[in-house]
Image (cartoon, rainbow, N blue to C red):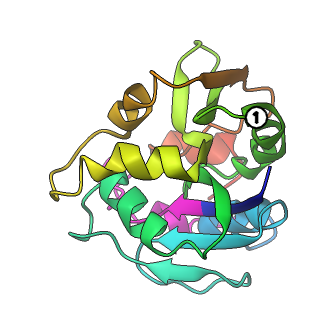
Amino acid sequence: MGSLAAIVIAGGESRRFGADKLALRDGEGRSLLEVTVAGVAEVTDVVIVVGPERPLDTDVIWTREVPPGGGPCAALIAGLACLPAGVTHVAVLAGDAPAGGAAVTALRQVIDDAAAAVVTDDAGREQPMTAVYAVPALRAAVAAYADGQHRAIRQVLDDLRPQTVVAIIDQWSASADIDRPEDAGSLGFS
């Protein structure tokens, strides 16, 4: 496999949470977004964060989706536009899933010639925001959604189904995210 970048989707408004969840802190004082970015930066060549700029200790490329808050598909389109030349695969992670980076190495090892390798959660559901995608396949899939309409990211994964999609069981809790205040404590954030 060639080079690997990461797109961290961090442009949501935290409506269900009721506050800026990406600013939550872990026991070491790091923000939720910093933990997520640092975890994936260890295993990728470049990290692109799609969302409003925030202080981070990790070097990243910042960009915004159009329109701001336009959802994960709009974030993918914006992130893909920032990929350096020659990147062949991209990890896609939610900014509020602090263990997401833990699965990237395993996903990278199983993708081979597939369009995508995704994590499945405890219920067996594929998690398209804890995945590694082949860049040409992902570009082709999101091209149909460049009209600015809000689309579900699951539809992008479904559009890749004609090509091989490899799923692996989530043994790292990599897809566990923080949607509600009660989720934060269980993942070590307050």
Q: Around disc 1, counting alpha carbons within 10 Å, would you say few (fewer than 14), some (14 to 19), or many (20 or more)?
A: some
Q: What stretch is highlighted in magenta?
A: 7-25
On the image, numbered disc 1 is attached to which residue? 112
Task: From the top left corner, tell me how far across and down residue 70 is, in percent.
Answer: 24, 60
In the depicted structure, whether residue 37 falls above or below residue 165: below
Task: Answer left or right for 174 relative to 161.
Answer: right
What residue type is disc 1 on?
Asp
| Residue 12 visible to an observer of this rendering | no
In the depicted structure, whether residue 91 falls above or below residue 172: below
In the depicted structure, whether residue 142 falls above or below residue 11: above
Q: Tell me what residue is drawn at x 32 percent, y 69 percent.
A: 65
Q: Which residue lies furthest to the top in this view?
A: 123
Residue 14 within the magenta-colored segment of the rendering? yes
Task: From the top left corner, tell me how far across and down residue 12 is, in percent.
Answer: 36, 60
Task: Answer left or right for 101 relative to 92.
Answer: right
Q: Tell me what residue is drawn at x 66 percent, y 22 percent.
A: 167
Task: From the top left corner, tell me how far across and down residue 64 is, in percent.
Answer: 36, 75
Magenta: main secondary structure equals loop
User: Looking at this view, is 138 or 176 the one in front?
Assistant: 138
Q: In which quarter of the image is residue 154?
A: top left
User: Looking at this view, is 179 or 108 the one in front?
Assistant: 108
As helix, strand or loop, the secondary structure at mark 1 comes to loop
Task: From the top left corner, tell me how far across and down residue 55 is, in percent.
Answer: 59, 87
| Residue 25 visible to an observer of this rendering | yes
Q: Tell me what residue is drawn at x 38 percent, y 37 percent.
A: 156
Residue 18 within the magenta-colored segment of the rendering? yes
